[in-house]
Amino acid sequence: MSTLKITFNNTSSLPDTQVSFGFVSGSATAAFSITNLMDSSAVLPLNETVGSGNWYTLSDLCAGVAITNFSGRIYASYGQTWDVLSVGYEPAQNITDANFFLRYDKMELTFNGSPDDVADLTSIDYWSIPMNLETFLNGVSVQTDNGITGGFTIQDVFNELNTLTTPPVSGLSGALPALV
């Protein structure tokens, strides 16, 4: 059985106790097998029960995780994590969602040991936490996917997005401004 090891690297100014991760399966019937390498405990799906959810701080996952079967999203959150409003819930990109104003982002991953396994950053969907994804084979870096292309900074991205969204306009009649 193939295993994918994932480690997380905090390059923000936040302490590891303020950076959290949650794992959301793409399907309620999909296999979900993730182990915390720090203590060999099972990692639980983030949104399987209503409430605060199964979030893990970077301190909890300091040795990384081992995945043998997973297809879904890995959420990263800065500071306050989002609450699970219903079983299977994920936040909507909508001002009416109770978790809309929290700082989180996600990457998408499918891994079951197949040649067609994939991973991608979601900066194409929206941008909240700058992330990079680097793959290794036998300890050697193979490929890096930067959430920001070369020659640009996080501040450059923010400035462009700020220009595009000031004033906030959705194009929908009666829509409320994002106020983010």
Image (cartoon, helix red, strand yellow):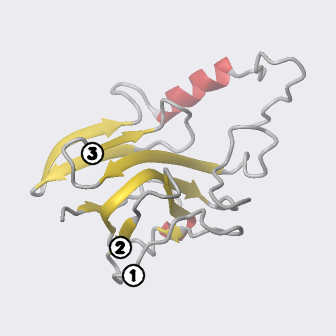
Type of the residue with mark 1: Ser
Towards the viewer: 119 or 179: 119
The span from disc 1 to disc 3 (Cα, nearest Å) is 24 Å
Which of the two discs, 2 and 3, labels the residue nearer the N terminus? 2
Whichever of callouts 1 and 3 sits on the residue coming sooner in the sequence is 1
Q: Are marks 1 and 3 in contact (CB under 8 Å)?
A: no
- Which residue lies at the image location 86% right of the left edge and 29% below the top edge? 176
Q: Callout 2: few (<14), some (14-19), or many (20+) C-alpha neighbours within 10 Å? A: some
The N terminus lies in quadrant: bottom left
SS category of the residue bearing label 3: loop
* 3D distance between C-alphas at marks 2 and 3: 19 Å
Picture coordinates of residue 90 (x, y %)?
63, 51
The residue tagged 2 is 35
Name the secondary structure under disc 1.
loop
Q: Which residue is mark 1?
A: 41
**Residue 28 rendering spot, x and y as whole percentages:** 53, 57
